[in-house]
């Protein structure tokens, strides 16, 4: 629902741009005002701005690498985990698995409150401990009843920590985290792999209320391991639908409509080309606008002047994003012709009335 609202705001911004150029000779050189009364600054596409956008993207990549850095972390026991505790030479303290019981069904489960019960020891706060720490606590307490107890503790069922995989995978659902690191590629593989409709360049990972964009295409096609990031408890992996990865073109374009982003790569120049280019008779190449949504629901607006030689070179370096709206304004003479076309019927009626009156 949020995506539809954002797209609606962007289209409204595009229409606001169009409304600012109704009269002959007017151009969009000042902030655009949305129907809600919000004012959005228009940024002119220049080489400096493109360099700033690229630097910002590199900064986001570094932030991503730091947030998802591969770190070896010991597994910490949590509520729901099932443990197996073996006290050597004391079978009476070990629940026998038998030939018809597996280790999971014969183990001790950590309660929802994080406590584990064990004979002679009583209740132990196991939540937050690693295996070695729990073994030390059990050994210390059992030593009051058993001389030099030898214990073996292991997790036989990991149930406390989970990640969620949704979207375009064959088997979406919940995956338990264990003592082995789980990467994004691992999670997708364990979920049956990608569907035919999956958008490999658009995988989102939600963590602590923030969404990070992952490019699996770079991982699968170019072995870019920086995109195979480590997952943590409660991460949500969302593989997007490629049919939703579109750019919309409006205004003086030969074929207005949508253009799909293929493999995560589409520049402004390519989008205009895919739509058949400008309408040579009515378009104003100096007034091309890209309206882009943002997390604050206030869209960004970029202005490209393609009326000079290097304009399309800038367009070739400007990467499009899903749900961008491209608007090509009308040339001044076309605006004047349309105004005249709208006025002529009224002028004709007025002239006819005057003639009759005379």
Image (tube, grey):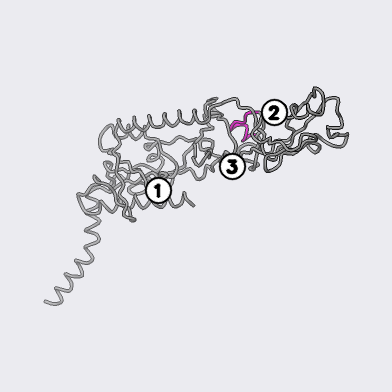
Residue 220 shown left or right of residue 134 in the figure? left
**Magenta-highlighted stretch: main secondary structure?**
helix
- What secondary structure is found at the residue carrying circle 2? helix
Q: On the image, which quarter does residue 119 sit in? A: top right
Q: Point out the residue furthest to the top here.
A: 148
Pointer 3: what residue? 168
Count of picture labels:
3
Pointer 1: what residue? 297
Q: Point out the residue furthest to the right here.
A: 99
Q: Which residues are magenta?
A: 180-189
Tell me the crowding category of disc 3: few under 14, some 14 to 19, or many 20 or more residues within 10 angstroms, Cα based. many
Q: Residue 204: give x, y in percent of width and height.
A: 52, 39
Q: Residue 296: give x, y in percent of width and height.
A: 40, 46
Circle number at residue 245: none
Q: Nearer the viewer, mark 3 or mark 2?
A: 2
Tell me the crowding category of disc 2: few under 14, some 14 to 19, or many 20 or more residues within 10 angstroms, Cα based. some
Pointer 2: what residue? 131
| Inter-mark Cα distance, 1 to 3 | 26 Å
Q: Nearer the viewer, mark 1 or mark 2?
A: 2
Q: Residue at x 26, y 41 (%)?
A: 286
Give yes or no for residue 185 being in the magenta stretch. yes
Give the mark nearer the N terminus: 1 vs 2: 2
Q: Residue at x 57, y 25 (%)?
A: 71
| Inter-mark Cα distance, 1 to 2 | 47 Å
Q: Point out the residue furthest to the front here.
A: 144
Q: Is residue 327 above or below residue 190?
A: below
Q: Point out the residue furthest to the left here.
A: 358
Q: Nearer the viewer, mark 1 or mark 3?
A: 1
- What secondary structure is found at the residue carrying circle 1? loop
Residue 48 shown left or right of residue 154 in the figure? left
Q: Residue 140: give x, y in percent of width and height.
A: 74, 27
């Amino acid at each position: 629902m949020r995506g539809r609202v954002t797209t609606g705001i962007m289209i409204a911004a595009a229409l606001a741009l169009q409304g600012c150029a109704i009269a002959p000779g007017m151009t969009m050189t000042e902030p655009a005002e949305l129907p809600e009364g919000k004012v959005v600054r228009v940024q002119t596409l220049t080489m400096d701005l493109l360099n700033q956008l690229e630097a910002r993207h590199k900064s986001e990549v570094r932030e991503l690498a730091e947030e998802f850095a591969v770190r070896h972390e010991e597994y910490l026991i949590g509520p729901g985990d099932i443990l197996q505790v073996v006290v050597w030479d004391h079978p009476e303290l070990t629940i026998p698995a038998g030939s018809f019981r597996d280790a999971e069904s014969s183990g001790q489960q950590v309660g929802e409150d994080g406590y584990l019960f064990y004979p002679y020891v009583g209740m132990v706060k196991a939540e937050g401990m690693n295996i070695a720490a729990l073994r030390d606590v059990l050994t210390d307490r059992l030593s009051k009843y058993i001389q030099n107890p030898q214990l073996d503790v292991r997790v036989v069922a990991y149930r406390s920590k989970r990640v969620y995989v949704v979207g375009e995978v064959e088997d979406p659902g919940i995956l338990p985290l264990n003592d082995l690191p789980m990467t994004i590629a691992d999670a997708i593989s364990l979920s049956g792999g990608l569907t035919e409709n999956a958008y490999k360049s658009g995988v989102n990972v939600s963590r602590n209320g923030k969404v990070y964009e992952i490019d699996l295409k770079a991982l699968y096609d170019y072995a870019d391991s920086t995109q195979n990031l480590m997952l943590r408890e409660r991460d949500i992996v969302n593989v997007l639908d490629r049919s939703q990865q579109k750019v919309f073109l409006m205004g003086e374009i030969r074929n207005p409509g949508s253009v799909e982003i293929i493999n995560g790569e589409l520049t402004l120049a390519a989008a205009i080309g895919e739509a058949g280019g400008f309408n040579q008779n009515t378009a104003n190449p100096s007034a091309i606008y890209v309206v882009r949504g943002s997390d604050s629901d206030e869209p960004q607006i970029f202005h490209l002047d393609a009326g000079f030689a290097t304009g399309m070179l800038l367009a070739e370096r400007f990467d499009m994003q899903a749900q961008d709206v491209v608007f090509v304004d009308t040339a001044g003479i076309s605006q004047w012709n349309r105004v005249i076309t709208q006025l002529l019927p009224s002028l004709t009626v007025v002239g006819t009335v005057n003639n009759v009156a005379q």
